[in-house]
Structure formats: C-alpha cells, structure tokens
Image (spheres, grey):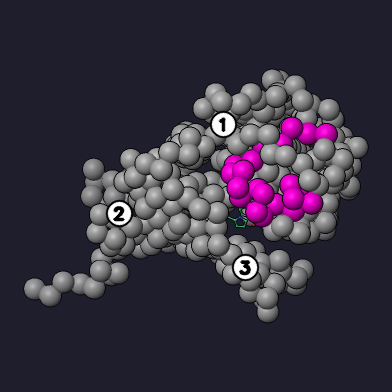
Amino acid sequence: KKALPRLLNAAQIPLREVESLLHYKELIPRLEEALGKFSSRDSVEVIQPVRSTVPLQKHNGFLGLMPTYMENDGVLSTKLVCFYNRGAGSTLPSVSATVLLLDPESGHMKAVMDGEAITSMRTAGASEISAKLLMRPGAEVLAILGTGQQALSHYNAFTEMLSFKEVRVWNHRREGAEKFCRSVSGPVTVCGSVEEAVRGADVIVTVTRSTEPVLCGRWVKPGAHVAAVGACRPDWRELDDSLMKEAVVYADSREGAMAESGDVILSGVEVFAELGDVINGIKPAYREKTTVFKSLGMGVEDAVAANLVYEQWKAKAYKL
Ligand SMILES: NC(=O)C1=CN([C@@H]2O[C@H](COP(=O)(O)OP(=O)(O)OC[C@H]3O[C@@H](n4cnc5c(N)ncnc54)[C@H](O)[C@@H]3O)[C@@H](O)[C@H]2O)C=CC1
Ligand SMILES: O=C([O-])C1=[NH+]CCC1
C-alpha cells in the first residue's frame, strides 16, 4: 500500500478546535515551567533563538519565524507569525499565525495548527504569570489599554485566574472599548483617557498597536505592575521614559528585549531579570516597587501550548 505523503499524515487542527482544547488552568502551569527552563539556559531544556523577522513593507507588517527545541521534553516546533500595523478601516486581523509541531527524531511533521488562539492565550498566560509574581498582594484594580484580540485574552486570563474588584478599559477609539465591554461576560468600566483608566490601578496591561508611548509614568501608582505586551519592534514604544526609568524591568527573554523592544532600547534601561529567573528563585520579585514586565513573545511559549493542544487532540481523537 502506498504511504500517504507525510504532510497529509500530520494532524490539522483549525482555530475553533485549538480554542476548545486550550484552557488557562492547564496552559499556565506549563508556561511557568517553560519560562523557568528557558532562563536556566540549559540546551537540553530549551534551545530558542531570538525570532528572525522579515519586513513586509508593502503591507506594514513583519513575518516572524520562531523555532524551539526542548530536548528533554521531546518537543520541536516553529511558529510562523505575520503581524501587521493595519489602518483603521481594515477588517483583517493584526496577527496571523501557524504552529508546526515536528517529531524531533524523524523530522516529520506531527501537526499543523492555527496559531491565533495559541498566540493570544500564551501571551495572556505569560502576562498573568508576571502579575501573579510581581503585583502587590491584594491588588484590586486592573486597567487594560487597547481593546483588540490580546485585550480579550488578557481580560479572560486575568479575571479567570486572579481576582480584581474593578476592571477598566481604554481604547483610542471609544467605540472599540464599548464593543469590547459588550463582548465580555463581567463588568468593565470604559474610560475616556489613559490617565483616567490607570490612576490608582494596581495592574496595567498595555495591548495596543501604538508606536508612540501611550502610558506615562506620572499617571502610574507607585508599586503598580505593568504588563507591556505591544511595541514589539526596536523603534516602537508604549511606555514613556519616566515609567521605564522608575520601574524595575523584567522581560520574558533578555536577548529578545534587547533586540526588539523599543521601550527597553530607546529608554536605555537595563532588564533586571527574566520572569524565569524569578520562577527559578535566582532573582527577587520586587512586589512593593513599580514593575514592568516587557513581553515580546517566545517560541518556547508556543511550543508548550502547541504540545498541549496536540496531547489533548490525540486523547480526543483516540479516546485515550
Ligand atoms: N508580546 C507578545 O507576545 C505579543 C504581542 N502582540 C502585540 O500586542 C499588540 C496587540 O495585538 P492584538 O490585540 O492582536 O492587536 P489588535 O489589532 O487586535 O488590537 C490592537 C488595539 O490597539 C488599538 N490601537 C491601534 N492603533 C493604536 C494607536 N496608535 N494608539 C493606541 N491604540 C491603538 C486598536 O484600536 C486595538 O484596540 C500588538 O502591538 C501586537 O504586536 C501580539 C501578539 C503577541
Ligand atoms: O510572539 C508573537 O507571536 C508576537 N509578538 C509580537 C507580535 C507577534
């Protein structure tokens, strides 16, 4: 019997199925473990170079290639992600991604899966871990700046895994913030300015496509935690210099932040630690100080999320 071409043997897992298989309660502990392994810089745990990017100038975007190998876990994957800074009229998403999971021994493809939900959920999961480690105990007020895809996943992860008494949102177009409020299940206050949204907030999530600072240090309560998720290019900003200089800055990857983060590069600040260093007990979590977690996104986060999806998919397909 003629064998099927190898590509057709690979599981194909579309967006809705990935969404139905991925849950924060299982994903976040795996992300936490992966961040610790990444920061141990042990090549049998994780090999993950800083992503390569190719500009798509005509479309105001980039293609990012994000390979990862976890030898001890037998996980080999790469994500292909295109991200765009689209104009207001566009109906296309800002992020379009595919994750390929390979068998490390043969190099054959095990699965091809949609990377949109993986990107949204693993990013929100990493930010949730940053907040859990770095926010003040008893944090009550969460502010989210931006109301797109990442805002929604961050709202879901933060309200499911942590407890806040109040959630505020701001968007540069008010109708975007109003639409966001209608799409979520809990109460959210729409704010007319960034300052109104963040004054007194304990945790602030920045998930905009801005290329200029939207969040100023003078509005941020001392001791607040900021998860800064947008501005993933060396000349893009979301946070101003005063906030960057006031805060203790943590990152997912030190090399990633120094290569890609405009907030880090242009403010000239040092990355104090990776989240994985805190998880590994190598560096302290300064909960009482103002902290920034600069997230760029890492292949190892995609690898563990995709592996989890694949495990769940197999269990469902073969009724394990
Ligand atoms: N750190 C990471 O791992 C990841 C970071 N990202 C980044 O997160 C950000 C948000 O991504 P998505 O939610 O997928 O995008 P999105 O397009 O769904 O949402 C972007 C939000 O920013 C707002 N916005 C657009 N231009 C703005 C401006 N000039 N000033 C203020 N707000 C503006 C939009 O109205 C919208 O509310 C992007 O910068 C993206 O590159 C995305 C995926 C992973
Ligand atoms: O990690 C990721 O997938 C991305 N980071 C910035 C845009 C996409």
Q: Which residue is mark 3?
A: 62
Q: Residue at x 76, y 57 (%)?
A: 236
Q: Measured along the vertical axis of the image, is residue 219 above or below residue 265?
A: above
Element at label 3: strand
Amino acid type, label 2: Pro
Q: Position of residue 12 (x, y in %)?
A: 35, 63
Amino acid type, label 1: Asp
Give neighbour class at mark 3: few <14, some 14-19, many 20+ (Cα, 10 Å).
Answer: some
Alpha-carbon span between mark 2 and mark 1: 27 Å
Q: Is mark 3 within 8 Å of ligand 2?
A: yes
Q: Which residue is mark 2?
A: 104
Q: Position of residue 136 (x, y in %)?
A: 72, 23
Q: Which residue is mark 1?
A: 277
Q: Which mark is residue 47?
A: none
Which sits in the foreground, 82 or 162? 82
Which residues, given as a range, are shown in magenta?
Answer: 246-266
